[in-house]
Every structure is written in structure tokens, then in C-alpha cells.
Amino acid sequence: MGYNTNDDNIYKVGATVTAKSNPDLKLTIMRYYHRTYYCVDVNDAGGNQVSYFERELSLPAGVKLAKRT
């Protein structure tokens, strides 16, 4: 039995987001898997990936999400 969770994310891979715990740090989403976003620092693309849940992330100021279809 398959369960596909990779279509319910609101942030896309490659998007720039910030962590709510540290809004000054910009992150790039590298991967989304099982409702978890794996991100790296924008300035250190080869660095370690850090995992976040959707509720822990936000868009940088002035950026808006596209509407879901």
C-alpha cells in the first residue's frame, strides 16, 4: 500500500525560506520527504542539511505564496 505525501507541501524544492526560530537566516529547501523539509543555509550550499516541519518555516518578508490549484 503506497502513501504519497510529496504533493501536499506548500514550499517547493529550491525555494528560499526562513526558520521562525531564526528569521535572519535564509535557507534553501533541498528536499521534501514525509512532511519534512530538508534545508541548507543559502550561503553554505555544501553544508549540512537541517530538517524542519512546515510550521517551523516562513517566507522572507515581502514574498508571497502562489495560490494552490
Image: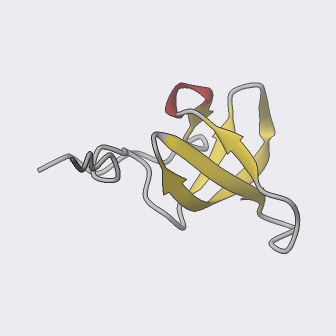
Q: Is residue 46 above or below residue 4?
A: below
Image location of residue 27, percent across then percent down: 71, 53
Image location of residue 62, percent across then percent down: 52, 44
Which residue is drawn at the image coordinates 57% and 47% (left, top)? Answer: 37
Q: Residue furthest left?
A: 69
Q: Is residue 69 above or below residue 28?
A: above
Image location of residue 53, percent across then percent down: 57, 33
Q: How is the image coloured?
A: secondary structure
Q: Residue furthest front?
A: 1
Which residue is drawn at the image coordinates 69% and 27% (left, top)? Answer: 20
Image location of residue 55, percent across then percent down: 53, 25
Which residue is drawn at the image coordinates 21% and 47% (left, top)? Answer: 1
Q: Is residue 47 above or below residue 32?
A: below
Which residue is drawn at the image coordinates 61% and 28% (left, top)? Answer: 56
Q: Residue furthest bottom?
A: 46
Numbered disc total: 0
In the image, is 25 to the left or to the right of 32? right
